[in-house]
Image: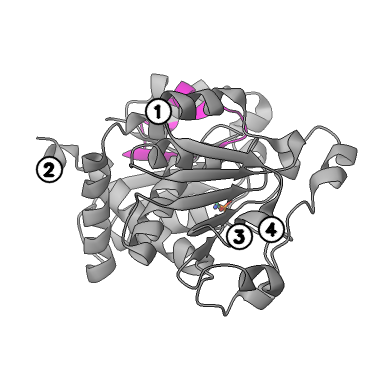
Amino acid sequence: MKHLISTEQFTNTGQLEQIFKLTDHYQKIGVSETLKNKIIACIFYEPSTRTRLSFETAALRLGAQVISTENAAQFSSAAKGETLEDTIKVISSYADAIVLRHFEKGASKRASLVSSVPIINAGDGAGEHPTQALLDIYTILKELGRLNDLKIALVGDLLNGRTIHSLINLLSLYDSNTLYLISPRELRLSDIYLKYLKSKKIKFIETADLSSALQHIDVLYMTRVQKERIESIKEYEKVKNAYSLNNQDVKKMKQGSIIMHPLPRVNEISPDIDNDKRATYFRQAKNGLYVRMAILDLFLNKEKYDH
Ligand code: CP
């Protein structure tokens, strides 16, 4: 695997176990010189707090140096009309890997076709966010001790949520999970993913009713309604507060369950819940740093890991 574009690239759990093992290693040692003399380019055409800064921190903790633009749409030559392909061709002659976030679905795939160095998809429009899904399943494993035989509620904007799309692919690799797909009608998971789940024989229940599901689930994965992907403000206003988890809701949940969110949150989870032991979202964000250290190491030191 030269590039990381989609979680569809993972076809067996052994590949994920390799990432978990390396993640555990970096969580333990914290810093390393494994990417000394390497340069990582973080090119972001859309806003980010966690993904960009955790990738940059991961690179620095591995001894690499970072070149970066946090607003490539405005401050790179894209603003003058340069194509993504030309930009990537040039940056791949400067850096040893490119971490790319873009507003268009498929942008990372396009970049990978012209890049001489690994492209890591850090979110492509409403497409995918594979490193987020990797840190999500790592978090589930660390918190619950397993990735199979779980009842997992995916809640919110299932239509536009790229973290959801990437996560569904990975969860489908594990046995006996049941997915509760909970969204307003307008933000239902698209047929492509529903067909995919059926083809993989993954049990799923589609509903708009979060409250009735709470008592059954092991993992509650809340997501933000993706305002930037919804056509009109009127449509957004209709769905923006569809789900807003509060203390009363959490009381219905099992003691051993966990509450996740890729963040940023808007109104999906009340801050009153943050001190509940089931609130996992800040630990989840922290895990992202170590997962991204593992990913950078794997993709830049391929010869060390390819058998
Ligand atoms: N979860 C996530 O992708 O967060 P950022 O948009 O802050 O990177």
Quadrant in the picture for the N terminus: top left
At a point 82% along the width and 42% down the height, the residue shown is: 236
Q: Earlier in the sequence, mark 1 or mark 2?
A: 1
Q: Residue furthest bottom?
A: 275
Residue with the mark numbered 1: 200
Identify which amino acid the numbered label 2 is placed on: Lys
Is the residue indicated by label 2 positioned so its CB lies within 8 Å of ligand 1? no
Label of residue 211 in the image: 4
C-alpha separation, residue under disc 2 versus residue under disc 3: 44 Å
Q: Residues within 10 Å of mark 4 (few under 14, many from 20)?
A: few
The residue mark sitting in front, 2 or 3, is: 3
Above or below 208: residue 90: above
Instruction: Specify whether residue 98 is painted magenta.
Output: yes
Say what secondary structure mark 2 lies in: helix
Instruction: Specify whether residue 37 is painted magenta.
Output: no
| Residue 112 screen position, x and y as percent | 40, 25
Query: Can residue 90 be seen in the rendering of this structure?
Result: yes
C-alpha separation, residue under disc 1 versus residue under disc 3: 25 Å
At a point 13% along the width and 37% down the height, the residue shown is: 303
Which span of residues is magenta-colored? 91-111
Q: Is residue 191 left or right of residue 121?
A: right
Say what secondary structure mark 4 lies in: helix
Identify which amino acid the numbered label 1 is placed on: Lys
The residue mark sitting in front, 1 or 2, is: 1
Residue with the mark numbered 2: 304
Identify which amino acid the numbered label 4 is placed on: Ser
Residue with the mark numbered 3: 214
The residue mark sitting in front, 2 or 4, is: 4
